[in-house]
C-alpha cells in the first residue's frame, strides 16, 4: 500500500509539473478559476483561501472553504486550473448532497483515530504475545484498525473520480484550458518583470516542448546560456 501511495504521489507531481507549463489563454489564476466554477454552480457560501505547502489543496466541508496551495492559488496555468476545479468539484458534491462524500466525511474521524492507533496496537500485541495468551488477538485488532485505512482509500476513489469528472466537464464546457499554448518563463521572471529575455519558439510542441524547456532551464541555471522564454 505504501509503495502504491508513493507511485501515485510521484505520478501526480510529474503531471503537475508537466501541465504547469501549459498556460491559460484567459490568464486566470487558480483562485479565479475556483471562484468562477463555484459561481457557475450557484454556490455563494464557499470561500477560496490560500494554504501553505505544495499540493496541499483540499475542500473542507466543515467551514466550507476551498483551500488552494501556494503553487495553485496565484498561478495561471493548466495544472493550477485543474487542481482548483477538482477541489471545487468536492464543493459541488457537498452542495448537491453526493452520498459517497457524506460517507467519507462521516468516516474521517474514525479512520484518523484507527490510523494513529493501528501500529501502536500491532506492536503492543507482538510484545504481549511473549507474555500473555491474548497478545495475538491484540495484534490482530491492530491489523484490523490498519485495514480501516485501506477501506477508506477504496471509499475515497469514487469521490475523487466524480470530483475530477465534474471539474473536467466544467473546464471543457467553459473552454478554460487550451492545448494550443505552452510556455515556460525564466525562474526569476516575476522578480524582474522589466528585464528583456530572448524568445525560443518550439514547433511540434506536443513532442518537443518539454525537452527544449528542460534543457533551457538546466543550462541557464548553470549560466551556460542566458535565461529565455520558451513557447510552443
Image (tube, rainbow, N blue to C red):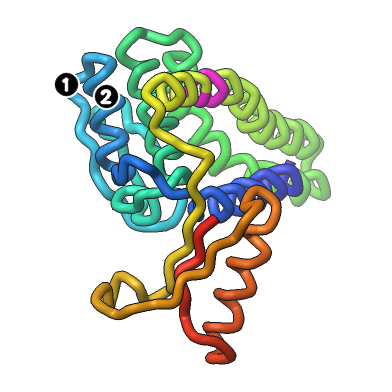
The residue labelled by disc 1 is 44
The disc at residue 146 is none
Secondary structure beneath label 1: loop
Q: Is residue 207 above or below residue 220?
A: above
Residue 79 falls left or right of residue 147: left
Characterize the local packing of mark 2: few (<14), some (14-19) or many (20 or more) Cα atoms within 10 angstroms.
many
Percent across and percent down for residue 32 are 25, 39
- The residue depicted at 49 percent of the width and 25 percent of the height is 168
Q: Is residue 192 above or below residue 90?
A: below
Among the 4 quarters of the image, the one containing residue 105:
top left
Using the image as rendered, state which of residue 230 and residue 13 is in the foreground.
230
Secondary structure beneath label 2: helix
What is the C-alpha distance between the residues marked 2 and 1? 7 Å
Among the 4 quarters of the image, the one containing residue 53:
bottom left
- The residue depicted at 21 percent of the width and 27 percent of the height is 46
Using the image as rendered, state which of residue 158 and residue 224 is in the foreground.
224
Could you tell me which quadrant the N terminus lies in?
top right
The magenta segment = 160-164
The residue labelled by disc 2 is 38
Percent across and percent down for residue 217 are 55, 74
In this orientation, does residue 107 appear? no
Residue 11 falls left or right of residue 47: right
Magenta-span inclusion, residue 184:
no
Which one is earlier in the sequence, the residue at label 2 or at label 1?
2
Q: Is residue 110 above or below residue 191?
A: above
In this orientation, does residue 199 appear? yes
Mark 2 vs 1: CB contact within 8 A: yes
Percent across and percent down for residue 138 are 71, 35
Using the image as rendered, state which of residue 222 and residue 132 is in the foreground.
222
Name the main secondary structure of what is drawn in magenta: helix
Amino acid at each position: 500500500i505504501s509503495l502504491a501511495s508513493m507511485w501515485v504521489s510521484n505520478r501526480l507531481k510529474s503531471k503537475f509539473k508537466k501541465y504547469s507549463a501549459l498556460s491559460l489563454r484567459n490568464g486566470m489564476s487558480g483562485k479565479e478559476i475556483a471562484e468562477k466554477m463555484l459561481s457557475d454552480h450557484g454556490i455563494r457560501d464557499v470561500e477560496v483561501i490560500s494554504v501553505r505547502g505544495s499540493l496541499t489543496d483540499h475542500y473542507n466541508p466543515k467551514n466550507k472553504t476551498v483551500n488552494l496551495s501556494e503553487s495553485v492559488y496565484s498561478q495561471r496555468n493548466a495544472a493550477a486550473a485543474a487542481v482548483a476545479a477538482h477541489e471545487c468539484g468536492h464543493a459541488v458534491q457537498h452542495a448537491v448532497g453526493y452520498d459517497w462524500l457524506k460517507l467519507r466525511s462521516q468516516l474521517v474521524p474514525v479512520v484518523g483515530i484507527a490510523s494513529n492507533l493501528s501500529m501502536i496496537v500491532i506492536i503492543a500485541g507482538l510484545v504481549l504475545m511473549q507474555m500473555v495468551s491474548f497478545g495475538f488477538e491484540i495484534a490482530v485488532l491492530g491489523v484490523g484498525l490498519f485495514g480501516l485505512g485501506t477501506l477508506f482509500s477504496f471509499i475515497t476513489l469514487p469521490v475523487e473520480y466524480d470530483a475530477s469528472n465534474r471539474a473536467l466537464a466544467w473546464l471543457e464546457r467553459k473552454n478554460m484550458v487550451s492545448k494550443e499554448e505552452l510556455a515556460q518563463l525564466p525562474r526569476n521572471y516575476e522578480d524582474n518583470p522589466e528585464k528583456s529575455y530572448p524568445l525560443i519558439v518550439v514547433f511540434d510542441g506536443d513532442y518537443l516542448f518539454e525537452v527544449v524547456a528542460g534543457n533551457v532551464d538546466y543550462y541557464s541555471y548553470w549560466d551556460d546560456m542566458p535565461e529565455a522564454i520558451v513557447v510552443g
